[in-house]
Every structure is written in structure tokens, then in C-alpha cells.
Image: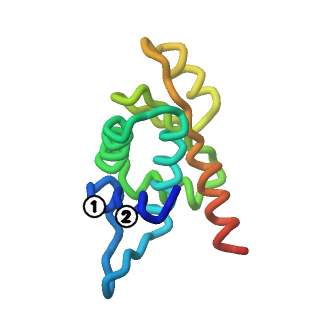
Amino acid sequence: MSLRQIQWWDERGVVSPKHVDGRRVYSQAEVLEILVIVDLGLKGFSLQRIRTVVKALQIARGQRLLQSALLSQRPVYLLTDGDAIRIAESAERVVEILKGACNGMVLVCITDHARRLMASVAA
């Protein structure tokens, strides 16, 4: 992902960081959100579908979900078909959701992204 792409997402309201002295300042939760967006993009989601998922995450769980993934030792999974989103906090719950799904679902382990983010901050 390029800096221009991140700027483009800001301009379109996909991820909107604070603007301080003409610079974009991203919180850890916003960086984690970007990592989830990139993951969905690599899995073939269009920007419109990604925007739908991100807005639903922001409305349904907001920063609490992302902060939970950053601070918790428990796994946090996002499952989506591009329209509906489901959050699971165990592998068993992931299996339950997949068994009940009518459409194909994409799985993103938010906790894995959070761990990589925290490791890069610590380095």
C-alpha cells in the first residue's frame, strides 16, 4: 500500500485520521483499521465493499473492537461476505458462524494484525 493510497482513503472518508498542522496523525486503532482494509483488498474486496465493512465496524463496535484487539490476549476475528459482518472471539464461534452462513465468508484475524502492529511499535 502506498502513502498516496492512504491519502486517497482519507479523502474519501474510508479512514479519517486527525489533521494536525497539515499532517495526518493516525491512532493505533486507525492503523489497525488500515491493515484490515489492506487484508480485505488482497482478498478481492472492492473499495465499496470495504467501505461498507469498515463503516459497519465503526458503527457496531467502533474503537472498542479495535482497542480490544490491541490490548487483549483473546483472538478477535472478523467474518464478512461484504455486506454482513460478524465478530467472533473464539475459533468455535468462527465455525458456528461459517456453518450458518448462506454466502461465502472471508475471515480476517484482527488480533494477528494487532500483534504485528504492536511488535513494529516496540521495535
In the rendered image, the residue lying farthest to the right is 123
Q: Which residue is mark 2?
A: 7
Quadrant where the image shows the C terminus: bottom right
Q: Is residue 29 left or right of residue 56?
A: right
At a point 47% along the width and 65% down the height, the residue shown is 3
Q: Is residue 73 left or right of residue 62?
A: right
Tag of residue 3: none
Residue 116 in the image, given as x and y percentages of width and height? 66, 58
Q: Secondary structure at mark 1?
A: helix
Q: Residues within 10 Å of mark 2 (few under 14, many from 20)?
A: some
Q: Nearer the viewer, residue 103 or 67?
A: 103
Cα distance between the residues tagged 2 and 1: 6 Å
Q: Are marks 2 and 1 in contact (CB under 8 Å)?
A: yes
Q: Measured along the vertical axis of the image, is residue 92 above or below residue 33?
A: above
Q: Nearer the viewer, residue 3 or 66?
A: 3
Residue 85 in the image, given as x and y percentages of width and height? 40, 33
Q: Nearer the viewer, residue 78 or 44?
A: 44
Amino acid type at image mark 2: Gln
Q: Measured along the vertical axis of the image, is residue 90 above or below residue 98?
A: below
Q: Measured along the vertical axis of the image, is residue 90 above or below residue 25?
A: above
At a point 42% along the width and 57% down the height, the residue shown is 5
In the rendered image, the residue lying farthest to the bottom is 21
Q: Which residue is mark 1?
A: 11
Report the number of numbered marks: 2
Amino acid type at image mark 1: Glu
Q: Residues within 10 Å of mark 1 (few under 14, many from 20)?
A: few
Q: Is residue 123 left or right of residue 44?
A: right
Residue 10 in the image, given as x and y percentages of width and height? 32, 61
At a point 55% along the width and 20% down the height, the residue shown is 96
- Residue 46 found in image quarter: top left
At a point 54% along the width and 39% down the height, the residue shown is 42
Q: Secondary structure at mark 2?
A: helix
